[in-house]
Image (cartoon, coloured by chain):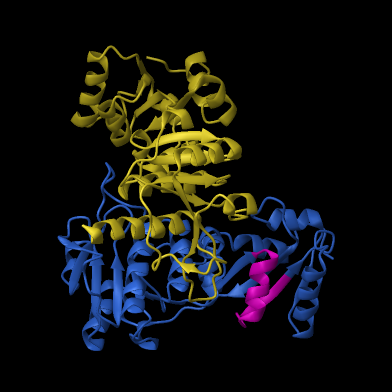
Chain colours: A yellow, B blue
Amino acid sequence: MITSASNERVKFIRRLQERKARQETGLFYLEGLRIVAEALETGAGIEQVIASPDLLRSPFGQELVSKARERGLDVLEVSAEVFARLSLKEGPQGLAAVVRQRWMTLEDIAPAAGRPWVALDSVADPGNLGTIMRTCDAAGGAGLILLDQSTDPYDPSAVRASMGALFDQQIVRAGFEEFAAWVRKSNCAVIGTSDAAEQDYHAFAYPDPLVLLMGSERQGLQPHHLALCSAVVSIPMLGKSDSLNLAVATAVVLYEILNQRRDRG
Amino acid sequence: MITSASNERVKFIRRLQERKARQETGLFYLEGLRIVAEALETGAGIEQVIASPDLLRSPFGQELVSKARERGLDVLEVSAEVFARLSLKEGPQGLAAVVRQRWMTLEDIAPAAGRPWVALDSVADPGNLGTIMRTCDAAGGAGLILLDQSTDPYDPSAVRASMGALFDQQIVRAGFEEFAAWVRKSNCAVIGTSDAAEQDYHAFAYPDPLVLLMGSERQGLQPHHLALCSAVVSIPMLGKSDSLNLAVATAVVLYEILNQRRDRG
């Protein structure tokens, strides 16, 4: 059992909190009984399980460690003190994992009926990004296309907010020009949102398949984005607010798309 | 101009980052050109404006300070260094305010047609709470009823996420029993949400007026909450996720309520 926080393997795991280390290694860190259980279930590329026997008291947690060992996974045992140094949670549960990131390219994916894609331009807040993954999964979306300078979906805040949807949603990274070429080639409808659009999001009949394109928190959709859209819709705002939180706006439109599909039967 | 961060007035303002100090004083801190402008516009109870002339370079910002002075408000000038100590932002803009909290009680409010109330049980995350304020404002809601152990809507993260909706939404704090008595007396419909409910949120015809009751992030609605509901609805989740972020779930139902009202004309 590792009892020193200056152990090289422990330092390697801690560095995964930084984007640079995640980019260099292609790995990320996740923590908690439930999310490690999901990673084991979905066959996510677990490289290592980190367990602290002193903290990991529940039979469920111990069973997860046994399962990992049976699969031949590397299980690193650390003391409660070392685990606390790795942990990003209050009240750490004593189970974490180092997992391989799973990126796709536009060449790997195709528009599919009934499974909208969400394209995000330069999303800045990892919590927003994680919440959008979770919502996209719940609303039947296929995955996220992260355009240009988007924050990292493997940031600890994004991983936490995604609540496991990270393992089910496909994640694509692309530059705008590449995305525009993919849209033209696949002949897929792109629906944008903007508070300046005249078309009400609820009165609009959504095509299928589609990509829902959302602008960044600060800037919204830019002219080159709007030029790619077959339609741009707005969500009505009755109060003094002139915008919605990005994850909220994405959710409101995704559920409208789902409801229209359900209404059609 | 104050140039020392250990000045008593500066220390007083910094303490407002703590819930205890906010409770004792009934004040809170907010920061940024836009939100201070909104506070000035809406006649929020500004007790003090904090300005750092070195940072506050835009004509708009300087005009706000003049406006505050014309109204006889106390304007505290501080150096850029002192402002940075007070600031909770990267790239502080040099304008902040100390504002009086504005709480209401259930006795002050009544259900009103077309303006749903949102009741939150023990909401834990101030960012969620702020986002719900912002969404409630946009979706035409009347305000929030914070039940039992809810986090503080005047927490800096809640204030930031509310994007000014804090000044427009009515905020009520109440214990559950008091809320239940108000519901019975006012004969108002309470609609709950639960992933276990059979009633689909989109197929349900919402009464008007109503209170939308949302459970806490961790626990959802408890039996005593469900017993108060005239209906409980669920949002379909098609993926592996078995829940939505609280602010997202609230938004999805609030916009469904708004859409139904709009569809009826």
- Above or below residue B87? Residue A152 is above
Residue B206 on image: x %, y %? 25, 75
- Above or below residue B80? Residue A118 is above
- For the record, the magenta segment spans B31-49
Residue B18 sits in which quadrant?
bottom right
Residue A60 on image: x %, y %? 20, 31
In the depicted view, which residue is nearer to us: B105 or A106? A106
Is B210 left or right of A82, judged from the image as shown?
left
Q: Residue at horizontal 21%, vertical 57%? A: A265
Residue B4 sits in which quadrant?
bottom right
Q: Residue at horizontal 75%, vertical 79%? A: B68
Is B157 left or right of A90, judged from the image as shown?
right
**Magenta run includes residue B48:** yes
Is A11 left or right of B172, judged from the image as shown?
right
**Magenta run includes residue A73:** no
Give the farthest residue toward the top: A72
> Which quarter shows the N terminus of chain A?
top left
Count how many numbered circles sit on residues in the image: 0
In the depicted view, which residue is nearer to us: A257 or A76? A257
State whether residue A5 appears in this view: no
In the depicted view, which residue is nearer to us: A153 or B82? A153
Residue B56 on image: x %, y %? 80, 63
Residue B123 on image: x %, y %? 37, 60
Is A56 left or right of B248, judged from the image as shown?
left
Residue A168 sits in which quadrant?
top left
In the depicted view, which residue is nearer to us: B207 or A72? B207
State whether residue B45 appears in this view: yes
- Above or below residue A80? Residue B119 is below
